[in-house]
Image (spheres, rainbow, N blue to C red):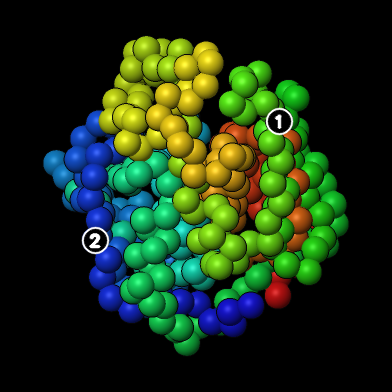
C-alpha cells in the first residue's frame, strides 16, 4: 500500500468528444498539493466542483453536481486516478464532460503511467471493511466484506447472445487494471439509441468509442476480450467507489449492478462507520 498521498509529476492534456453532450472537450490534469481532487470548469461560467458523495447523479454515467452545475462521465478518469494512487490533482475542463476517448479508461491510464506519480508529504488514510453488509436494488446486489486487499467480483447477465452471463474477479492494483480492465470499453444497445437521444444523451456516441450491439451480436467487432462487458463494469465500479474518498481494503461482490447501486454502497459506507476502520 502506498503510504503517502500522491499527485502527478507534470501536466497531462487530452481532448475528444463527450459521449453524452456530443461536444468537443479539452481536459487538463495538473499536479496539486491540495490533498483533494478538484474539478474546474472553464466555459461560459467558470466554476469549481469538489467530490461530494451526496452531490452525485447517475444517468448512464456518473455525474458530479453542485446545484445546476455538473461534470458528466467522470467514472473512467476517477478509476484511473484511483488505481495509480492519485488523490491530489486539479482537473481543468473546457466543457462539462470528461472526453470518452476510445470508450475505455486505457488512454488515461497509459498517460498516468507515462507521466509518473509524485508522493506528497501527507499520509494516506485507508478504509478497511471489518463487517459484511449487502446493498440491494431490485434483482441487483453488492455484497461487501473484509479482505486483506481491495478485491472485486462482478457478475452481469443480459439476454443477448454476445453477453449472456459473465463473471470476473480482480485484485485491484495499477498493474491488473492496465492489463485486465482499462482496455474494456463502454457498451450499448442499438435499440436504446433513439430513447437516449430523446433524453439528450449519447449524442457523441459512435462505433469508435463504444461497443455497440444489435439484436444478433456486436456491430463493431472484434471485442478486446470475450468478456469485455463485465470487465468494463469493474472499471465503472472502481471509479464510483473512489467517491468514498479513501483507498479501500475489502471485497466487493457485485451482481447485475450499475452506477446507481455503486453509489448506494458509497453512501452506505459513509453513513455506517461501524462497518469499517480507518487506518
Residue lying farthest to the left in this orientation: 44
The structure residue drawn at horizontal position 55% and vertical position 52%, both measured from the top left corner, is 181
The N terminus sits in image quarter: bottom right
The structure residue drawn at horizontal position 34% and vertical position 74%, both measured from the top left corner, is 115
Q: Disc 2 designates what residue?
A: 13
Q: Secondary structure at mark 1?
A: strand
Residue 112 drawn at (x, y percent): 38, 67
Dividing the picture into quadrants, the one containing residue 250 is bottom right
Front in this rendered view, residue 206 or 272: 206
Q: Is residue 41 visible?
A: yes
Q: Is residue 243 visible?
A: no
From this view, report whether residue 158 is shown above or below residue 25.
above
Left or right, 71 with respect to 241, comes to: left
Front in this rendered view, residue 59 or 181: 181
Which of discs 1 and 2 lies nearer the camera? The answer is 1
From this view, report whether residue 176 is shown above or below residue 117.
above
Circle number at residue 76: none
Mark 1 vs 2, N-terminal side: 2
Circle number at residue 165: 1
> How crowded is the residue under tag 1: few (<14 C-alpha within 10 Å), some, or many (20+)?
some
Q: Secondary structure at mark 2?
A: strand
From this view, report whether residue 18 is shown above or below residue 241.
above
Left or right, 27 with respect to 230, comes to: left
Residue 46 drawn at (x, y percent): 20, 49
Residue 179 drawn at (x, y percent): 54, 60
The C terminus sits in image quarter: bottom right
The structure residue drawn at horizontal position 78% and vertical position 50%, both measured from the top left corner, is 144
Left or right, 216 with respect to 252, comes to: left
Residue 56 drawn at (x, y percent): 49, 41
Amino acid at each position: 500500500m502506498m503510504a503517502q498521498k500522491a499527485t502527478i509529476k507534470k501536466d497531462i492534456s487530452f481532448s475528444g468528444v463527450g459521449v453524452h453532450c456530443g461536444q468537443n472537450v479539452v481536459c487538463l490534469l495538473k499536479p496539486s498539493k491540495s490533498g483533494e481532487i478538484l474539478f474546474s470548469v472553464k466555459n461560459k461560467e467558470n466554476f469549481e466542483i469538489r467530490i461530494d458523495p451526496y452531490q452525485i447523479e447517475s444517468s448512464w454515467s456518473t455525474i458530479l453536481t453542485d446545484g445546476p452545475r455538473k461534470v458528466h462521465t467522470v467514472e473512467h478518469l476517477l478509476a484511473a486516478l484511483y488505481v495509480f494512487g492519485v488523490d491530489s490533482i486539479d482537473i481543468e475542463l473546457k466543457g462539462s464532460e470528461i472526453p470518452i476517448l476510445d470508450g475505455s479508461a486505457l488512454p488515461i491510464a497509459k498517460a498516468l503511467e507515462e507521466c509518473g506519480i509524485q508522493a506528497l508529504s501527507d499520509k494516506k488514510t485507508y478504509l478497511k471493511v471489518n463487517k459484511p453488509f449487502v446493498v440491494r436494488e431490485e434483482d441487483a446486489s453488492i455484497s461487501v466484506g473484509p479482505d486483506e486487499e481491495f478485491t472485486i467480483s462482478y457478475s452481469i447477465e443480459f439476454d443477448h447472445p454476445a453477453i449472456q452471463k459473465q463473471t470476473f474477479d480482480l485484485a485491484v492494483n495499477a498493474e491488473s487494471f492496465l492489463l485486465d480492465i482499462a482496455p474494456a470499453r463502454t457498451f450499448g444497445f442499438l435499440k436504446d439509441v433513439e430513447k437516449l437521444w430523446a433524453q439528450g444523451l449519447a449524442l457523441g456516441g459512435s462505433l469508435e468509442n463504444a461497443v455497440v450491439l444489435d439484436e444478433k451480436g456486436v456491430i463493431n467487432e472484434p471485442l478486446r476480450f470475450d468478456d469485455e462487458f463485465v470487465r468494463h463494469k469493474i472499471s465503472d465500479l472502481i471509479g464510483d467507489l473512489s467517491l468514498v474518498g479513501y483507498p479501500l481494503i475489502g471485497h466487493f461482490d457485485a451482481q447485475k449492478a450499475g452506477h446507481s447501486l455503486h453509489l448506494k454502497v458509497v453512501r452506505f459506507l459513509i453513513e455506517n462507520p461501524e462497518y469499517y476502520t480507518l487506518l
